[in-house]
Image (cartoon, rainbow, N blue to C red):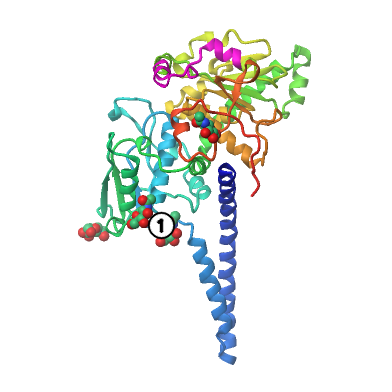
Amino acid sequence: MEKRKSIMNFANSEFLKLRSCQMKSMVFRCFILVILILVLRTTICSFHGSTWLTWRTSNWIVMSVASNLQYSIRRDKFLEVPQIVWGLNNQKIALARACLTARFLNRTLLMPSLSASLFYKEVDLLKPMPFDKIFNFEKFNALCDRFVRLGRYSDPLNHTKLFELQKGSGRKWTKERDLDQLNQSREELVDTAEVIRIVGKNPFLWHDHWPVKEYANIFECLVVVDEIENEVTKVISKIREVGRMVGHKIDASEKKEIAHDLRDTHVPYIAVHMWIEKDWMIHCKKVEQKLRINEICSTKEQIIERVSHITGIQSRVAVYLAVADILLEDNTVLNGWKDGLVPFDKKRLGVLGVYKKYPYLIQSAIDYEVCSRAEIFVGNSFSTFSSLIVLSRTQKLIRMRLTNSCSTEVVYPSYAYNILGQSGGAKRWMTDMSASSLVGISYGTNNISCYSNWDTSL
Ligand SMILES: *[C@@H]1O[C@H](CO)[C@@H](O)[C@H](O)[C@H]1NC(C)=O
Ligand SMILES: *[C@@H]1O[C@H](CO)[C@@H](O)[C@H](O)[C@H]1NC(C)=O
Ligand SMILES: *[C@@H]1O[C@H](CO)[C@@H](O)[C@H](O)[C@H]1NC(C)=O
Ligand SMILES: *[C@@H]1O[C@H](CO)[C@@H](O)[C@H](O)[C@H]1NC(C)=O
């Protein structure tokens, strides 16, 4: 019931977005109407002195403008947050959290700096990267209109009218205290400041006060810039091209003709996020001990085994292996795959050059898109990278009004190889969109499943 409700709310918010567009055009039409009527009035009034018609019309306009503003975010109050650090996924979550904090304070978020590289400890060495180097600023504001808003540092009129809000940390800084502090910042004394600057640690570490579907709303507004989109398209067409070759054992004489015939047909691919870097394996063993479960770490062999037992993979298909940079020289990830699953990493695919041009953050953003758009995705449910990909794929299914995501005919299925599913395969995985916090996504979970009776109607 809870889930149903929240999915409906989710759908509702989409509906509201649509409505607000209609409202805009309505306001515009009203504006034209009022001009017309003003012109008419001057003509009519000189004859009758009647103001009734004008009163009705202008009142109607005031009302529709008011309802239009109901969902908007103030454009003259701002929130500033510290530079956002760590992996792409933690940066995305931190960004969304900063946006939701700004929304809570009804303020425009000053476009935060992301970090191009991945230093865990030496925060001072982190190279800042502007948000709009990766994500399209205008599209973000257009898609998230009335929900959250990003502004530029040149927007505030007077940077000296600033309030510094020191976030607490440590065990004593509870979720309740944190929310309390934010709530107090909505009161008049603080609220008069044009800019509130939050000082403290990485926003990823702030307490989480918002449900998954609000984060999901924000992630949907993050559209990569054209330059990155072009690289994503390049990589995906390369994968589909090799997929076409492995799917059809074509002899040389036929090759040209068939390749031409098949150019526009859709060749599906599988993407596997292999999380087997050495430092991760050490870390994950510790987490397994702490949580007393053994469903987190998967070896290469286990991953291959569970991917090959996913039911529904029939023909020969290309498998894109999303692995970290340091593993690229290690060709062994390409060995051991069952006949029918033909693995490719960046090197074998011939796209290493595409990635090498960019810093870590952009490489990771390209991989994220390539995995998100795969026909089948398999990842680790304790990886934030995998979890965010599954979230975006779940949203895609909601858009398709799918009611039974457990059905074998589902398009865009996702799986977790670290959890055993049916017939020895990886387990079917979707995001629980009704979750009241992002904890399962940020820190991982072994409680995953598909959902068999979703109500995706409005
Ligand atoms: C923000 O403030 C404006 C103006 O006071 C108000 O109309 C709007 O509803 C507020 N938005 C939110 C999300 O609270
Ligand atoms: C900015 O605010 C400060 C403090 O309120 C004030 O002294 C200063 O004149 C303001 N500057 C501008 C350009 O408004
Ligand atoms: C915020 O403070 C107001 C009173 O100023 C209170 O009514 C409200 O319940 C508080 N909200 C939260 C989320 O703490
Ligand atoms: C697992 O997740 C479902 C919702 O997806 C929830 O209802 C259930 O309580 C969770 N179980 C555990 C043990 O956390």
Name the quadrant containing residue 34.
bottom right
Considering the whole magenta stretch, tell me its main secondary structure.
helix
Query: In the rendering, at what x and y percent does residue 129 appear?
Result: 38, 35
Q: Residue at x 52, y 9 (%)?
A: 331
Residue 290 highlighted magenta (yes or no): yes
Secondary structure beneath label 1: loop
* Relative side of 254 to 179, left or right: right
**Is 223 situated above or below 46?**
above
* Relative side of 319 to 96, left or right: right
Query: In the rendering, at what x and y percent does residue 141 appear?
Result: 48, 49
Q: Depth check: 110 or 282 in front? A: 282
Query: In the rendering, at what x and y percent does residue 431 appear?
Result: 55, 34
Query: In the rendering, at what x and y percent does residue 149 appear?
Result: 44, 50
Q: Does the residue labelled 1 lie within 8 Å of ligand 1?
A: yes
Q: Can residue 141 be seen in this view?
A: yes
Q: Quadrant of the N terminus?
A: top right
**Is 203 situated above or below 110?**
above
Name the quadrant containing residue 343.
top right
Q: Residue at x 66, y 40 (%)?
A: 400
| Ligand 2 lies in quarter | bottom left
Q: Depth check: 300 or 151 in front? A: 300
Mark 1 surroundings: few (<14), some (14-19) or many (≥20) residues within 10 A: some
What type is the residue that disc 1 sits on? Answer: Arg
Q: Is residue 77 visible?
A: no
Residue 272 highlighted magenta (yes or no): no
Q: Mark 1 points at which residue?
A: 74
Count of numbered tags: 1
**Is 264 situated above or below 66?**
above
Q: Give the range drawn in magenta.
A: 285-306
